[in-house]
């Protein structure tokens, strides 16, 4: 829904970024073969090779590198992304350092890739980089809370260093929510300064995740362990209509 609000010329580039990171995510989350790490390494190697040649026979990689070469998305963002994806291959409990490293590579750098497309300008990118990282971090942490049961019980992952799945309670949840709210506050300043071509689209995703966090905040920790909280399609559509029809103010 958010992509529909980008200027049309930007949409293929956002699709290209999303496609590559989605495939990497599917390898670590859905693929059940014994060579999971090998497949992920091959995706990284093929992508980086195509960055230098400008061509790949894999259409998803080719689309990504076409965007990457146009907007100067390089290995400085790709390497930490694949590093974080590798961390998901083996079930683990994250300490604070791993938690921060993982969020940077899995979410913040994806926000920075998109920011390269939004701004296409070094000075503007540097001014908005801080906020973009906080927005990516906020989205990822909300995802962690939303998917807390599946991550822990199905995939064997526990991201939050504050507690374990068994000791996760309302007091721990409150600390995590407060941290996410700080990320959202920092990100809001950057969204207001985005170019007209991307501001509404990012604002819609911000509103959606803010609404999701509000629902999570009102849900007990014990209930989060049992079911996945979501914003239903009618409510998503209402957010889309209000945002698309609203003024695109900086």
Image (spheres, rainbow, N blue to C red):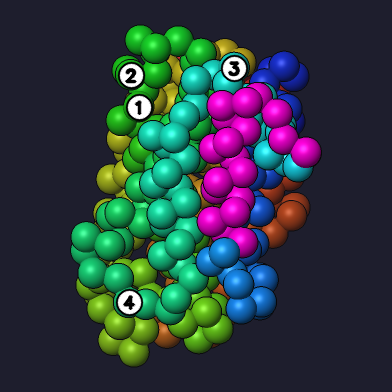
Contact? badges 4 and 2 (CB < 8 Å): no
Give the Cα distance between marks 1 and 2. Answer: 5 Å
Residue 174 position, x and y percent, is 28, 66
**Could you tell me residue 166's position as x and y percent?**
34, 89
- Residue depicted at 35% across the width and 40% down the height: 134
Q: CA distance from mark 3 to mark 2?
A: 18 Å
The part of the image, by quadrant, that contains residue 11 is top right
**Image: 152 above or below 103:** below
Location of mark 4 (residue): 93
Gap in Å between the C-alphas at discs 4 and 3?
38 Å
Per the rendering, the mark at residue 242 is none
Residue 22 seen: yes
Disc 1 to disc 2: CB gap under 8 Å:
yes
Magenta segment boundaries in residue numbering = 39-57
Q: Mark 1 and mark 4: span between their CA atoms?
A: 29 Å
Neighbour class for label 1 at 10 Å: few (<14), some, many (≥20)? Answer: many
Left or right: 131 in relation to 136: left
Q: Which residue is mark 1?
A: 129
Q: Quadrant of the N terminus?
A: top right
Q: Nearer the viewer, mark 3 or mark 2?
A: 3
Q: Which residue is mark 3?
A: 70
């Amino acid at each position: 829904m958010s992509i529909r609000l980008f200027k049309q010329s930007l949409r293929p580039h956002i699709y290209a970024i999303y496609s590559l990171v989605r495939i990497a995510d599917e390898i670590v989350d859905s693929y059940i073969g014994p060579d999971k790490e090998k497949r992920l390494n091959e995706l990284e190697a093929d992508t980086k090779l195509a960055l230098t040649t400008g061509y790949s026979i894999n259409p998803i990689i080719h689309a990504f590198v076409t965007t990457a070469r146009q907007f100067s998305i390089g290995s400085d963002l790709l390497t930490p992304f694949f590093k974080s994806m590798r961390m998901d291959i083996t079930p683990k409990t994250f300490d604070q350092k791993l938690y921060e490293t993982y969020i940077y590579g899995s979410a913040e750098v994806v926000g920075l890739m998109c920011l390269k497309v939004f701004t296409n300008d070094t000075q503007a990118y540097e001014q908005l980089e801080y906020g973009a990282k906080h927005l990516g971090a906020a989205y990822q942490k909300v995802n962690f809370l939303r998917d807390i049961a599946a991550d822990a019980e199905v995939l064997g992952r526990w991201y939050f260093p504050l507690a374990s799945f068994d000791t996760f309670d309302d007091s721990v949840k409150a600390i995590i929510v407060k941290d996410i709210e700080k990320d959202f506050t920092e990100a809001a300043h950057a969204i207001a300064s985005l170019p007209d071509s991307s501001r509404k689209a990012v604002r819609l995703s911000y509103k959606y995740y803010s609404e999701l966090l509000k629902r999570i905040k009102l849900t007990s920790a014990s209930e989060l362990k049992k079911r996945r909280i979501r914003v239903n399609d009618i409510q998503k559509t209402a957010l889309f209509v209000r945002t698309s029809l609203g003024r695109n103010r900086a």
